[in-house]
Image (tube, rainbow, N blue to C red):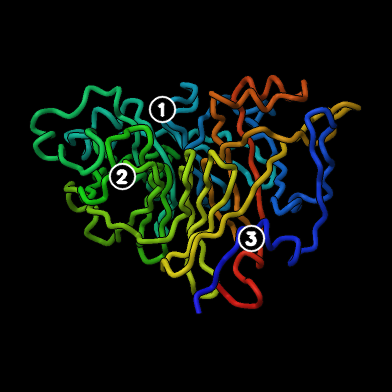
Amino acid sequence: MKHKYLVLGLIATALLGCGKVQQAADVAPVELDKNTEIADGTMMLKGRWITEPNGDVMIDPQTSGLTVWNDKLVSISDRSADVSQRMQLHLISPDTAKLSDKKMMLSLNDSLKDSCFAGYIQGNPDLEALVAVPDEPGVFLTITEDASSYKGLSESCVNQYGQSGSVDYPFVLIRLEVQKDNSVLMTHARPLKFSPSFNLGNYPNDGIEGLALSQDGRLYFALERDAQDRARIFTTTLNQDTWLHDRFIVVEDSKVKLPAFKHGNHPINALELYERDGHEYLFAAARNDEKLWLIDVTGQHETLIINLGFYASVNEPDDICSAWEPMDNASIEGLTIIDDTLWMVNDPWKKVYLNNISCEQNRAKYEKMAPLLFDLPIQDAWFTLGGNER
């Protein structure tokens, strides 16, 4: 019998017995007793400002990915970040939300300097998503997105890579490897090939925003939108031959069941794989919606939609503002998992980020486009309904 899975908002009260939290624009923020609470079916998350070693907030990193390495969270910035944040990996302590003082700058390996993509990826590429490679310590994957402002491919490279089934300048998967001096080499680069039947359209800045990688090399790609304005998830399998040549990586439709919407933009901006009781799931962040999607990798079950609400810490609370300020938008763009905790980092969305300002104590932080770190314990209730496993 096919189970019908409900939005978390319908099951949270029954399974977890939580009360309501009322919010209004003219009411001081609600005090949360725990790091995570459920109110009206919404997971309420308390975020800590990510800070530099000297205690200052991180300035405009435009975070585009999050993963785990050596018990640290690792993030990467896109091309619109402050110049001080680009082309490097950022190490973040999950315990303190503080950045490491180690500089992990990206550079091009000599073997890539003759690549068709060398000019773009060694300049200011739009790097999106980041995932650590299992069983290869210090190896990561990232991917390029928007290259619309770049001069483009040479004539010979257009002949080789001009028909990607997506954008004019193809999305390029890049292998990164940390060196002994903490520098990071871009060692390999391969473009993605999509079937024309996928009908992706040519949207360079609405491309691949999430990567997730399984232990056996199954790689998932989250696309913000196709020609029908739908988020998509594609997949391929990496193996020992993946980096032996520079031809297209051909991807397949994952055939997972994603939510269908009649109106609005509902992109995926981050992706992470989670294994539970021998089954694999994908967590996806729907940035525009402030929601989390829990996706069955086998495609047998509908996606579960989890409502999220976000609070930012207030360092000096007063009679007007308590210790936690409700956010208008968080715009999550990085997901990763440590044990059974889902970690999230936001990408300060310049168009709407200042809408978060209600407490003057946080005004300067928002104006600096400073990001926050959130953690969410993975809930048993997401995987069961009426005692039946998903």
Which numbered disc, 1 or 2, marks the residue that appears first in the sequence? 1
Q: Mark 3: give few (<14), some (14-19) or many (20+) Cα within 10 Å.
A: some
In the picture provided, is 62 more to the left or to the right than 46? Answer: left
The amino acid at mark 2 is Leu
Instruction: Give the quadrant of residue 361.
Output: top right
| Local SS, label 2 | strand
Mark 1 vs mark 3, CA separation in Å: 32 Å
Which numbered disc, 1 or 3, marks the residue that appears first in the sequence? 1
* Residue for badge 2: 173
* Residue for badge 1: 79
Instruction: Give the quadrant of residue 388.
Output: bottom right
| Local SS, label 1 | loop
| Local SS, label 3 | loop
Q: Which is nearer the eye, 167 or 313?
A: 167
Q: Mark 2: give few (<14), some (14-19) or many (20+) Cα within 10 Å.
A: many
**Residue 295 place in picture, x, y as percent:** 49, 60
* Residue for badge 3: 378
Q: Mark 1: give few (<14), some (14-19) or many (20+) Cα within 10 Å.
A: many
Is residue 258 visible in this depiction of the protein? yes
Q: Nearer the viewer, mark 2 or mark 3?
A: 3
The amino acid at mark 3 is Ile
In the picture provided, is 286 more to the left or to the right than 158? Answer: right
Mark 2 vs mark 3, CA separation in Å: 29 Å
Q: Nearer the viewer, mark 1 or mark 3?
A: 3
